[in-house]
Amino acid sequence: MFSNLINKRVLREVLLFAFIGLVILTLIPFGSVTPFPFAFAAIGMFALAIISGLLFGEPRQSRWVFSIALFLLVVLAGWAFIQTIELPANWLANPAWNSARDLAGAQSAAISVEPADTLASILWVALPFVTFLTGLLLCDTDQRARKVLTGLGLTVGIIAVFGLLQFLLFPNILIVVEKRAYLDSLTAVFVNRNTAATFLGLGTLLILTLVRDITRAYSNYPPGEPGRNALLLRSWIYILLLCACFTALMLSRSRAGIFATFVAALIYFPWLVINWNGSRRHLRPASRWRSMLKLLSAIVFVVVLLTMFAGQAILRAQERRLEDDDRFCILPGIWRAISDHWLTGTGLGTFRTVFSAYRDPACGIFGIFDRAHNFYLEGFLGLGILFPIAAVLVLSVLARVFWRGLVQRRRLRHYVLLGLATTVLVALHAAVDFSLQIPGFAVFYSAFLSAVVAISLGRSNGGADMAYEQPLTT
């Protein structure tokens, strides 16, 4: 029995590293926006989820979150499939099928105006959910969850370094192909600068957390021990990766991505500065004033960083005002489309087909909008009223998870706040861009979120606190 327990632990570690590796592989080829990398990522992650589920069963501490996520996956995928089923024309079927019957003699009718596209889009929705579920299955302890976060943080840092070298030395090349768009912006391994900004913004906060952990471990390490020099070297490596990630974020020139990152930083960084050397439950009046001074200094520092280093993004915002931005010009047309199909939606993945009938000629004839540049509106248009209900449920669950983590966790509380801040970052940017619709980033964020949720719901016992004191290796 003991040997079986050891074997399961070893197997879980192997699957955990396979999980991290698969997330990294999903990122590198342009965020897996092309069919072959996406298919490889989907097959690998589904296989990993099945193996993990059969071997380990439901997670113990995060079981209720796991159940809700699995329920949402089944409901959303099931509804998208129902949208492709042939229906009587006078029932829930989209009115466009009546015109198709009159003009071309079409015999079928469905809720979706493009059943084949909707059926194919189910997998794009399922992959992030499966990644999140797999992460919950494998992150059964704080140590394993932190290994996932460390692996993801190092990945962001390395990609940032690669993006900087590529942008400086080969600005017209994107990985190995010719770069045709965003020539003036750093996009790292992504095609779009806005997705890169969301990724790098999240990575900046994550690597900042790793820097905090490694410097605290170094300060607590006994002087003269051989491992102290190794910790010092690792701390400098993390600091350099942090600088590279922040620089790459600024060079992305994404207005919304940089703004959302600084909003998240205003939530996270002041608290991190105050508690850099550990939390204190009872502060003397002098200590409270010192903490307030640190808080104000941290806020001022974040604002100064924005004004000093986000100059290119600020310049873009001044040169191109909001009313001149095409993505805001098309919003009334999207709202009209939603108002016409608010109950059942037009079918998952059908925005490009549907929106052409609602596009305002005043927005110009240039550009083809195959995405809404708003994750929430596109989801509402595609899935109908079910999507806002699901979105509210997801945000409510995450709010409860983070609240519980902030109340119950002590030494790992900064990971809970990191999850809250990055969720604000991603949620804000999703209102004006489509980073969450890029498979590579969606998988990365799902893996990150699964580790943060596992820590938030973990037990704050002595064993967890002792494990926290030990530096992680990846």
Image (cartoon, rainbow, N blue to C red):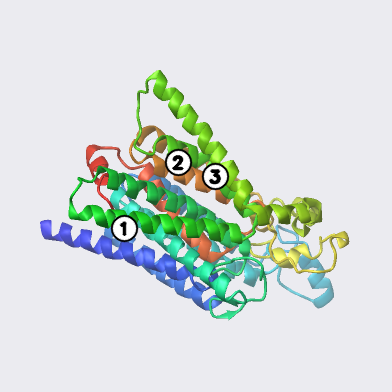
Q: Earlier in the sequence, mark 1 or mark 2?
A: 1
Using a 10 Å C-alpha cutoff, classify the residue at mark 3 as few (fewer than 14 neighbours), some (14 to 19) or many (20 or more): many
Identify the image quadrant of the C terminus: bottom left
Asked whether residue 229 is in view, the answer is: yes
Q: Which sits earlier in the primary sequence, circle 2 or circle 3?
A: 3
- Residue 123 position within the rendered picture, expressed as x and y whole percent measured from the top left: 53, 66
Secondary element at tag 2:
helix
Name the residue carrying label 2: 417
Nearer to us of marks 1 and 2 is 1
Q: Position of residue 372 (x, y in %)?
A: 70, 59
Q: Secondary structure at mark 1?
A: helix
Residue of label 3: 264
Graded by Cα atoms within 10 Å as few (under 14), some (14 to 19) or many (20 or more), the crowding at tag 2 reads many
Residue at the disc numbered 1: 233
**Tag 3 or tag 1, which sits nearer the N-term?**
1
Residue 268, percent from left and from top: 49, 41
- Is 93 on the left-hand or right-hand side of 32? right
The three-letter amino acid code for the residue at tag 2 is: Leu
Q: Residue furthest right?
A: 362
User: Is there a contact, CB below 8 Å, between mark 1 and mark 2?
Assistant: no
* Horizontal and vertical percent position of residue 375: 63, 55
As drawn, 407 above or below 434: above
Q: Residue at the far left: name it.
A: 2
User: How far apart are the alpha carbons under marks 2 and 3?
Assistant: 10 Å
Q: Residue furthest front?
A: 224
Between tags 1 and 3, which lies in front? 1
| Residue type at tag 1 | Leu
Residue type at numbered disc 3: Ala
Q: What is the spatial separation of the Cα atoms under label 1 and label 2, in whole angstroms?
A: 27 Å
